[in-house]
Amino acid sequence: MVNRTQVAIIGAGPSGLLLGQLLQKAGIDNVILERQSGEYVLGRIRAGVLEQGTVDLMREAGVSQRMDAEGLIHDGIELVFGGRRDRIDLKQLTGGSSVLVYGQTEVTRDLMAARAASGAPIIYEAANVQLHDVKSERPYVTFEKNGETIRLECDYIAGCDGFHGISRKTIPEEVLTHYERVYPFGWLGLLSDTPPVNHELIYAHHHRGFVLCSQRSTTRSRYYLQVPLTEKVEDWTDERFWQELKTRLPADVAGKIVTGPSLEKSIAPLRSYVVEPMQYGKLFLVGDAAHIVPPTGAKGLNLAASDVSTLYRILRSVYQEGRVDLIEKYSEVALRRVWKAERFSWFMTNLLHEFPDRDAFDKRMQRTDYDYYTSSEAGLKTIAENYVGLPYDPIE
């Protein structure tokens, strides 16, 4: 068992695995600790729209072969409001940028395979993980495995263990500022082995609630319906889901939907959340440990990837160039991009969802917002450049 490493990574989701892979390629030792099993991690159903920055980072990490072969390049998305369809030409509006549709499960699978091939340590089902002395020069992590308590000494700790993980909870509450917006609805998602209704994603507003027509491949579709938080998955048969989906979409789209048995159905609540700062001594918060976005802007995994990029480049400079002065810049640099992604996700959520407390004035303003953004070159460009992903901020 390794009892000393340079970077201890808490969490083996895509952000922890991606950070570990990049550090390993740079010759920086790291150990990944995960409280769940590998099978459990792979079983999480998540989004699959990758920004160009995330794609480039996967390539830099040397784990892009399958993504490049199987991922679907999307040069545009469609928005629907009041039955009117508007295409946002991402490539034309951003000077050539696009997004890649490749499921987060597949990203995780590729990163797991690369980790296994590298032989670098990854410990699944690590129980009772605790972080110690993170403000000192000698931080360490303890965990239990096979009935034994193990101490792992390190230089730095990357908290990639999600919203409910131990990393953020390790930071004293008086140090943190929490920003949160909880939305009064959730997304009911259905995954099916049916061809997507459209070759590009469709985001649709309807007076009965928002709809997203997404996809994982040319043969696997993912659809979402806005539902009240009081809804339960077991109340939604496949038949009821498909019928409601067709009701909320324009007739020409609804008529092309291929239905089939669901592989998975789940309801996810929507929230916007940011904690500041994103670092405390030698501990860095990455991804969902520091921020949550509503999925309307396709930013969750991509925002985690930009955190990974920032932390990786700082740590590489520390170990290869002795630039320990950059350590204190992580939170400031990461949060600049975090807040811009939070703003876009909040904007898209407000633009396309039905809010139960909106009055007639609010609804007219929502419609006018939509009309402005889809009829103005500046408005279209704003949506497009945010959707494909804003540039990563420089470290210096």
Image (tube, rainbow, N blue to C red):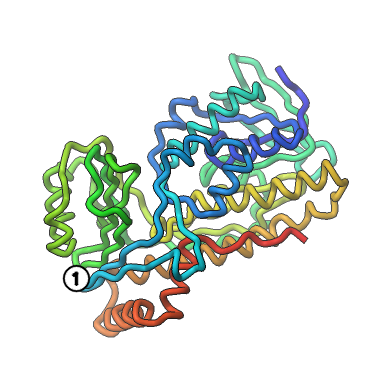
Task: Kindly identify the amino acid type of the residue bearing the numbered disc 1.
Answer: Gly
Q: How many marks?
A: 1
Residue placed most toward the observer, 306 or 5: 306
Which image quarter: residue 112? Answer: top right
> In the rendering, at what x and y percent does residue 297 appear?
42, 60
Please give the residue where the numbered disc 1 appears in the rendered image.
83
Residue at horizontal 27 percent and vertical 83 percent from the top: 364
Residue at horizontal 22 percent and vertical 41 percent from the top: 194
Residue at horizontal 46 percent and vertical 74 percent from the top: 381
The image quadrant where one finds the C terminus is: bottom right
> In the rendering, at what x and y percent does residue 64 appear?
54, 39
Position of 214 compared to 182: left or right? left
Residue placed most toward the observer, 14 or 227: 14
> In the rendering, at what x and y percent does residue 79 appear?
30, 67
Position of 218 compared to 343: left or right? left
Judge whether 217 appears above or below 363 on screen: above
Residue at horizontal 15 percent and vertical 53 percent from the top: 256
Which image quarter: residue 114? Answer: top right
The image quadrant where one finds the N terminus is: top right
For the question of whether residue 123 can be seen, the reply is: yes
Judge whether 361 appears above or below 44 on screen: below
Quick one: label 1, few (<14), some, or many (20+) residues within 10 Å?
A: some
Residue placed most toward the observer, 334 or 386: 386
